Image: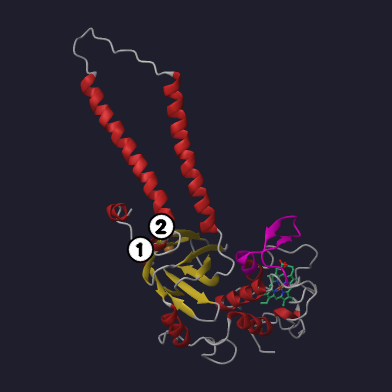
Amino acid sequence: METLRLILALPRGGSTIADRIDLLHGFVITVTMLVSTYVFVMAAWFTVRYHRRRDDQLTERLTATRRGEALIVVGVLGTFLLWWVIGFRQYVDVRDAPEDAEIVYVDAKQWMWKFAYADGRVSNDVLTVPLGRPIKLVMISRDVIHSFYVPGFRVKQDVLPGRYTTLWFEAKEAGSYPIWCAEYCGVSHSAMRGEVRVLDSEDYARWKRAGDPTLPEADCGRGPGSCGEASLLEQGRVVAERRQCVACHTLDGQPHIGPTWARLYGSEVALADGRRVVADDAYLTRSMMDPNADVVAGYRQVMPSYRGALSSGEAAALVELIRSLRDAPAGASGVTLPRLEVTAAGDGGTAP
Ligand SMILES: [Cu+2]
């Protein structure tokens, strides 16, 4: 396997799924190489063995046996189906993030990657993640189509304007992994590169505390530099209050001007236009940024758009909060926030 990786000039697999993907890749490439070598050798041999020696010579007529033909059909079809089955299972695993994955928002634009962490930090081009923790990226583009590609993790996902796409990975080795844009996106496409920096728990904790001194200090609602200490969940509560989401939404299962957030995450939502969608991270984010896109059945669309008003970090914290209420018991009111007046919604964050 390692030899094949070197022959193919692939970087070391640094994520939990990389080895399995390499295994299938190796399987497919080995079989196809063996078969094509066999075909070339046979073609060469037949050229010699059956070349025309006399002018009146006729080619021998050969007919395959039933069994031979059946064997070829079943063998070829079976091999392709086997690849498909393995590939499909891997695809499902690659698409389906673990439930406890940490969210990072990704904004792609010509020609850079911006990362916003749920604790309010932001960074450009460098994505810092802890070792051994699943990370889920919720990505959108500000301009054209880009594609987030980390060869070392064997993951790639298109990043589109106007639509949230997701990608997850779990790093299994600390180190630095290059990020590439894998979709031609303009003149400096080739310069649209970044880096995933995977830190072990000690370094990560240090990074969390200190942050990157070159970046502006994130403000998480308690003054600059207050982000590190608050948990994402707490962060979400602060943001929900500050942005006055709780003027219309409850956390305790009671419908209000808008639907409750209790047991919303992962549930199937019926929309006014008859569609049913699963409330995943992408849907929740879209609901904040573009509330007109999916109006929930039975509610008037009075929610203001938070595009521009809400930073990606705040959005991530809110999604984290909504996610934490996934299993909230029916009718419980353990997590109530003060109801606010419906007036100043989305005005850019006057603290209540
Ligand atoms: Cu790009």
* Quarter in which the C terminus is drawn: bottom right
Indicate left or right for 126 with 258 as reference.
left
| Callout 1 secondary element | helix
Extreme-top residue of the structure: 56
Badge 1 crowding class, 10 Å Cα cut-off, few under 14, some 14 to 19, many 20 or more, is some
Q: Left or right of 163: which side holds 24?
A: left
The residue pinned by badge 1 equals 190
Span shown in magenta: 261-285
Name the residue at 54% across, 72% down.
102
**Residue at the far bottom in the pictured view:** 223
Q: Position of residue 127 (x, y in %)?
A: 44, 73
Does label 2 point to a residue whose CB lies under 8 Å from ligand 1? Answer: no
Frontmost residue, 196 versus 38: 38
**Label 2 neighbourhood size at 10 Å, few (<14), some (14-19), many (20+)?**
some
Residue 5 placement, left or right of 309: left
Which residue: 76% across, 81% down? 342
In primary-sequence order, the first of circles 1 and 2 is: 2
Residue under the point 49% across and 79% down: 122
Q: Is residue 203 above or below residue 12?
A: below
Residue 19's disc number = 2
Query: Is any atom of residue 308 visible in this view?
Result: no
Q: Magenta span has 69?
A: no
**Left or right: residue 310 compared with residue 344:** left
Quadrant assignment, res 229: bottom right
**Image x and y of residue 294, in percent:** 69, 62
In this view, the residue in front, 203 or 216, is 203
* 41 or 261, nearer to the observer: 41
